[in-house]
Amino acid sequence: MSNSLTVSLTGTTDLPPGKIAAVVTSLEMLAQPAERPDPPGTEGFSLDRIDGNDIERYLDVYRLLGERWMWFSRLVKPRAELAVILSDPAVDLYAVRFDGRDVGLLELDFRAAGEGELAFFGLDEPVVGKGAGRWLMNRALALAWAKPIKRFWVHTCTIDHPGAINFYQRSGFKVFKRGIEIDDDPRLKGQMRADSVPHHPVIA
C-alpha cells in the first residue's frame, strides 16, 4: 500500500485500518509572561532532574502519563535515536515528585537556536486538580525564559487532554498553526497496551 494519502480540505478523509489521526494545534509566546503565584497547597511538589542517560526512568514516567492520551512518539523511536535526544545538553528533563514518587514530566528542548520547545508536559491523574498544572507551568516558564530565547512554543492535539489548549492559552501561549497528524496505531504493534486510550478505539 502506498504511504501517500490525499486529505480532503473540505470534508472527511477515510483512513486505512490501523491508522490514527489527530488535529495538532501549535502555540507560541514571544516574550516571558507576567509571573503568576503558585496555587495554594502545592508545597509538596518538587522537580527532580532526570539524567539523560537514564532512559528507563524517563520512559517509565512517559508511559505513566501518556498511555491514556496516546503519547507514543518516544515509544516507537529506536532506542539509539532516543538516547541521542535525551543525552543532548540542550534538552532538559525533569520528573515531578509528589508523595515520594514520580507523578509528572517536564521536557524542555533548546536545540533550535534562539527558541525553546515545551516538548512534553504532563501529570498523573491523581494529582490533577491539586494546582499541580499551574505549579509546573510556572517552573517551565521560569526555566525556559532563563535561557537566551526569543520564542517558546508547544503543540497539543485532539487525542491529548481536552483542556490542554485552554490551559496553554491561559499561560500566555497564542495559537499560530494547525495541522493533521496521521500515523500507525502503536497498539497494533505492541508498542502500547491494546486497551489504552479507549476514547480513541482501535480499528484493525
Image: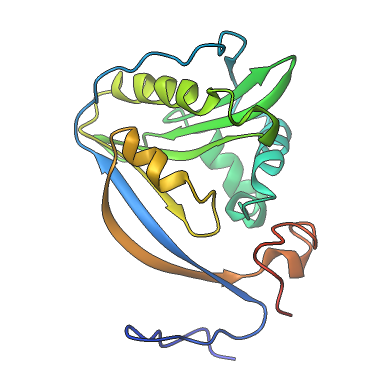
Q: Position of residue 163 (x, y in %)?
A: 48, 46
| Residue, far bottom | 1
Count of numbered circles on the image? 0
Whether residue 30 is situated above or below residue 98 in the rendered picture: below
- For this view, does 76 lie left or right of residue 119? right
Task: State which quadrant residue 37 falls in.
Answer: top left
Whether residue 33 is situated above or below residue 190 in the rendered picture: above
- Residue closer to the observer: 191 or 55: 191
Residue at the image position 33 percent from the left and 35 percent from the top: 170
Residue at the image position 49 percent from the left and 59 percent from the top: 158
Q: Position of residue 60 (x, y in %)?
A: 73, 37
Q: Quadrant of the N terminus?
A: bottom right
Whether residue 164 is situated above or below residue 40 in the rendered picture: below
Residue at the image position 58 percent from the left and 29 percent from the top: 129
| Residue, far top | 43
- Residue closer to the observer: 166 or 76: 166
Residue at the image position 59 percent from the left and 45 percent from the top: 82
Q: Position of residue 24 (x, y in %)?
A: 41, 60
Task: State which quadrant residue 169 falls in.
Answer: top left
- Residue closer to the observer: 13 or 1: 13
Q: Position of residue 26 (x, y in %)?
A: 34, 52
- For this view, does 78 lie left or right of residue 155? right
Q: How is the image coloured?
A: rainbow
